[in-house]
Image (cartoon, rainbow, N blue to C red):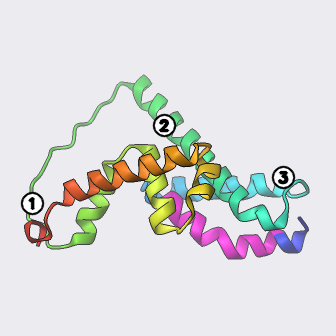
Amino acid sequence: MTIKEYNNTVNQYSDNVYRFILKNLKNESNSQDVVQDSFEKLWINRKAVIYEKAKSYLFTTAYRTMIDRIRKDKRITLTNETKTFESIHEDNYSDIQEVLHEAIDKLSEIQKSVVLLRDYEGYSYKEIATITELSEAQVKVYIYRARVYLKNYIGQIENVV
């Protein structure tokens, strides 16, 4: 990959990678760090990366970096032994988008990632399998289970509005 191709990759995919990571982490500064680390890794390995595969390489790297960050944060939280419990509230929601985001936040990390890659970013099952290092069948199962959970969580549209 040439410097010009690297710059094109940054221009083309930086927003998409940032949105994907932000949806998962829900923290702007951590998301920016993950994206920055991902582009740094791409820069370091630019000679080994084929330009046509840069998008896949970038999303895979960002995904793995995000998972590492989540695991690191969990270890820090567990060592500090500070547990905060959120109170469960049952408000009447009138915004389906808010309900959907709340439901997505309740998914496991892997389910959340595959659903976001499929439904928000438009990746194929094969591409998601490559990014997450799962088989295509596993990706389909995770997406199916996540969608069933989301459907049950949201319930009837009349109950939400």
Q: On the rendered structure, is 8 left or right of 122? A: right
What residue is shown with label 1?
91
**Residue 96 image-quadrant placement:** bottom left
Observer-nearest of 128 and 25: 128
Q: Is residue 79 above or below residue 101?
A: above
Determine the residue positioned at 82% across, 68% down. 6
Q: How far apart are marks 1 and 2 (CA)?
A: 30 Å
For label 3, count other residues whose C-alpha is less than 10 Å away and answer few (under 14), some (14-19) or many (20+): few
Q: Where is residue 122 in the image (x, y as percent from the top left)?
A: 53, 69
51 relative to 89, above or below:
below
Residue type at numbered disc 2: Asp
Q: Residue drawn at (84%, 72%), measured in percent from left and top? A: 5
Which quadrant does the N terminus fall into?
bottom right
Measured Cα–Cα span from mark 3 to mark 2? 25 Å
Amino acid type assigned to the residue bearing label 3 in the image: Ile
Residue 44 - label? 3
For disc 2, the marked residue is: 73
Q: How crowded is mark 2: few (under 14 residues within 10 Å), some or many (20 or more)?
A: few
Secondary structure under the numbered disc 3 in the rendered image: helix
Pointer 3 with pointer 2, Cβ within 8 A: no
- Mark 2, secondary structure of its residue: helix
* Residue 159 in the image, given as x and y percentages of width and height: 8, 66
Q: From this viewpoint, is residue 75 visible?
A: yes
Q: Give the CA distance from mark 3 to mark 1.
A: 49 Å
Q: Give the range drawn in magenta.
A: 6-22
Q: Where is residue 38 in the image (x, y as percent from the top left)?
A: 69, 54
Quadrant of residue 126 within the rendered picture: bottom right
Residue 33 appears in the rendering = no
Label 1 crowd bin: few (<14), some (14–19), many (20+), radius 10 Å: few
